[in-house]
Image (cartoon, rainbow, N blue to C red):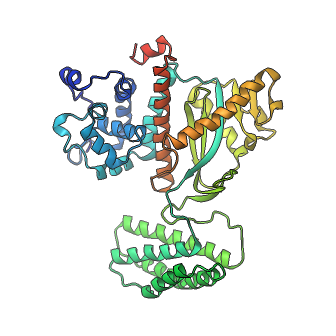
Amino acid sequence: MIEKKFEEAFTPEWVKKNITDLTNELVILRKVIPWQKIINRLTRFYDSGRGCVGISLRTVIGLFVVVRLRLLSDRGVVSQVRENRYIQYFCNVPDEKLKTFIHDSGLCKIRRRPGEEGIAVIESEIFDMLRLAGVIKGDCMLTDSTVLPADIIYPTDIGLIFKAFGKMRHFAETHGIPLWWDDREIKELWREYNLNRNKNEIPAYFFEFALIFVSALRTFGDRVGNLTASGGEKEKALRLLALLTLLNEKNEQKIAGERHIKNRTVSLDEPEARPIKKGKKHPDCEFGTTLQMSFNRQGFMVTVENFIGKPDDSTLWPATSELFIKRMGEIPEFAIGDQGYRSVANLSIPGGTEHIFLGRSSDVAEEKKDFCRKARSATEGFIAVAKNIRGFGRSLYRGFGGDRIWSLLCQTACNLKKFLQLYFTDEIGDESLKTLGLA
């Protein structure tokens, strides 16, 4: 059970004594973020009657936000709350609870409970609050796709098979089942392969590994079928069997001489990751998922979508345009992308947009060309900042659902940072500041 009530943890005296810099970004964001609205929408993910009362939802939300805002790990953010008065104030953790408010390992479990849907609530409430206050403008849609690299070891066919044996070994040890293959033979073969990585000999090693794997996988299927375990453990074993079966199918295609294998498995820990050609010089290929972003001209990140593999950009444009309009509540005057999005149909999407620029100057009138070119260049800059400064560089969460949660948290941090930038440069109007409680 999680504590759902939002109660201010600090007295005015404590704030006056410890929070001396009222221009600190966390002090400003603490006033702006609609805590109670988010709490009200997240309560349905938690049981109101079971378990001991633990960490408050208000603190959970604060931790979720600050972990990406300050680019911290779970362990790092818990440590910082205990040491940094401003983070402690932002997350609403009183002095008497500093030592026991949460263990860093618990943050992962708490994040898993609301999952993608719950994290999306946090992102959408903060975004809508800025939009309704008039801070985020919807007159211009800038769209581009990039790669969200997965945190995986560079894949090789033999390495994946060796990893598969490790997965089956863990299954056997967990359920007290004797190994059904010669594990010593596998380890010796792996050592020999790593000591003699002659390019001409790799196919022979691969064939030998694949041959042993086929036999072991067949027996693994029988073991899983006869497994007497809880529903969760059985389901986990069946998922592993399906993944290893898919790996075996890809191996058979390669042995048969196929060079272009669709949806090639590159990781057993990140099964949705794919090799994605970037169209850039270095690196020309990354392993992960496709990340589709849209911004407004200010640099606020309006939409973030994750896709398995590398879908054609031109097919993504209509749905992204529709999502942008839905989030902003208006049709943009400008819609700007590169030539990857270009098609005859896309030159009229979004409907009602006056100026649609898809990589060619001839797409728009002469007086709008300069604006569109600069906006297109700005898109590259926004993505570069998101990937190199705001945390989109590499997903540290497992699986496609983890990538989606990572993207939503990073999007929230990006938009809060952009808001702060506008705030400190006096680019936010008085009416907007009054709406946000900062006037």
| Residue found farthest to the left | 96
Pinpoint residue 306: horizontal percent, then vertical percent: 57, 47
Residue 47 visible within the image: no
| Percent position of residue 167, x then y | 44, 73
* Whole-percent x, y for residue 351 in the image: 73, 29
Residue 385 falls left or right of residue 366 = left
Q: Residue at the location (56% across, 67% down)?
A: 155
* Quadrant location, the C terminus: top left
Above or below — where is 166 with respect to 30? below
Residue visible at 47% across and 88% down in the picture? 185
Asked where in the image residue 3 lies, by quadrant, the reply is: top left
- Position of residue 229 measured from the top left corner of the image (x, y, whole percent): 34, 72
Q: Is 253 in front, or is 418?
A: 418
Q: Which quarter of the rendering shows the N terminus? A: top left
Instruction: Report whether residue 148 is seen.
Output: yes
At a point 56% along the width and 76% down the height, the residue shown is: 158
Q: Specify the quadrant of the image occupied by residue 300.
A: top right
330 vs 347, left or right, is: left
Along the viewing direction, whichever of 297 and 322 lies nearer the viewer: 297
Image height check: is 367 above or below 145? above
Up-down relation of residue 164 to residue 377 (above or below) = below
Q: How many marks?
A: 0
Residue extending furthest toward the right: 362
Residue sitting at x 50%, y 21%: 132
Q: Is residue 167 left or right of residue 141?
A: left
